[in-house]
Amino acid sequence: MGLYTGYSEEGRGSMRTLVDAALPGLTSREEGLIESADALGRGVLARNATAVDRGTLSVAVNLRALAEAGLAGVTVPTEAGGAGAGPAIFHRVLEGLCYGDGTTPFVIAQHYGVVGMIVASPNERLKALLPRMATGELFCGFGISHLRRTPPVLSATPYGAGYRLDGAVPWMTGYGLFSRVIIGGTLPDGQSLLAWTPFEESEELRIDPPMELVAMNGARTVSGRCEGLVVRPEDVVSIDQPQARAGANRTAVPCLYGIARACVDDLDALAERRAAPAYREAAARLRDRLDAQRPRFYALFAHKADETAVAEARAAATTLALDAVGALTVATAGGANAIAHPAQRRLREASVFATWGLATEAANVAVAALSAGA
């Protein structure tokens, strides 16, 4: 197996140690979820990463492997057949997956997010679908990032017993991978309506071709337009105040950690191969930063953290991941200029996660941290 596979023997050991250090007091079920995610990230996902990134292998292959490992239902309640894991474990699972590749956690995070929306919903018809979501029989996504925009780009208006949606849906991931999608529209009183709908082209939902992104094109992210999309009462997920869904996105943080860990381990391996002590010293410094950051981030889930703390954690993770992937890229001495090189893929993935779901406050903190220098 080649050097740049996204894992190493040393990486395996260090990852297991981090489980204990960052998340003390885990149950055996929680440890099992994390170990499964780490094994999948270091194994199947790492082996498939280049093919998925280049579009020669569908990420659906990884989703099936994830379901077979029992990870489709991480956030589904136990009474519905899932693992019933809390947010800290859900984020730690994403970190383990992202150690192997960025596309799969980018996609499955949408599914986990939908599960959370349905669990919180008063809609019992939708809750009855949770067992299918736990097994991976039903994968789902969402298009709600535009709800932060002013003025609204997608309106929801009362229509008969239900509602209708009109306007743009700028960002939906998983087209052709997910069979259902939750779309968010803004009601006349400013509240947000979340609607459950088929994720397919129709006269009411026009879908553009998949976007050509800098990375993770296998996630099949599209934009769409609702043209009188009718939402039946039984398809209403929730109606919330818009601020309930605002704030910095925590989900990118563990993905950035996964990228950083993979780059540090590969930099260590490169140092050994080239007998380059400077590379090993750089890897040690980056690992120390990672080991210091992770416990602080996961501790945020023990209480209701304010958005400033979340923004600071995200800024630190962004700086670390970009530093780690930058160090590895330079250390390859030109190898990473090849589009299929894993370090090149990691560089592009880090740029996506650095901006994914980024709220204004988090962006301000991250830009300040990145401009501060060493």
Image (tube, rainbow, N blue to C red):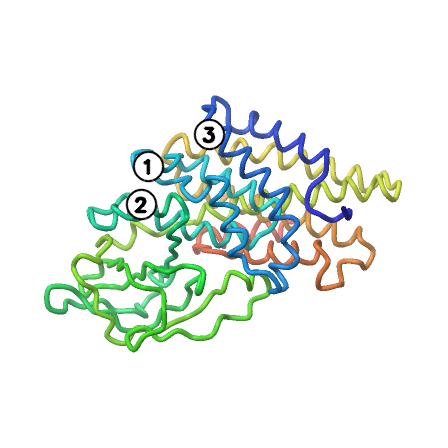
Q: Which residue is mark 2?
A: 130
User: Circle 3 — which element?
Assistant: helix
Sequence-wise, which precedes: disc 3 or disc 2?
Answer: 3
Rounded to the nearest angstrom, the CA distance separating label 3 from label 2 is: 20 Å
236 in relation to 99, above or below: below
Left or right, residue 63 beside residue 372:
left
At x 21%, y 69%, the residue is: 230
Residue 374 visible in the shown view: no
Q: Quadrant of residue 289?
A: top right
Q: Residues within 10 Å of mark 1 (few under 14, many from 20)?
A: some
* Number of marks in picture: 3
Q: Amino acid at mark 1?
A: Pro
The spot of residue 131 in percent (x, y) is: 32, 43
Which element type, helix, strand or loop, lies under badge 2? helix
In this rendered view, identify the residue nearer to me: 61 or 213: 61
Which residue extends farthest right?
A: 275
In the rendered structure, are the residues bearing label 2 and label 1 in contact, judged by CB atoms less than 8 Å apart? yes
User: Can residue 66 be seen in the rendering of this structure?
Assistant: yes
Measuring from the top left, give residue 294's x and y in whole percent.
56, 35
The residue at 68%/50% (across/down) is 325
Residue under the point 28% across and 43% down: 119
Q: Residues within 10 Å of mark 2 (few under 14, many from 20)?
A: many
Which of the numbered marks, if any, corresponds to residue 77?
Answer: 1
Quarter of image, res 203: bottom left
Front residue of 347/242: it is: 347
Q: Position of residue 288 (x, y in %)?
A: 67, 33
Distance, label 3 to label 1, CA atoms, is: 13 Å
Q: What amino acid is found at the position of numbered circle 2 in the picture? A: Leu
- Please name the residue that numbered disc 3 is placed on: 30
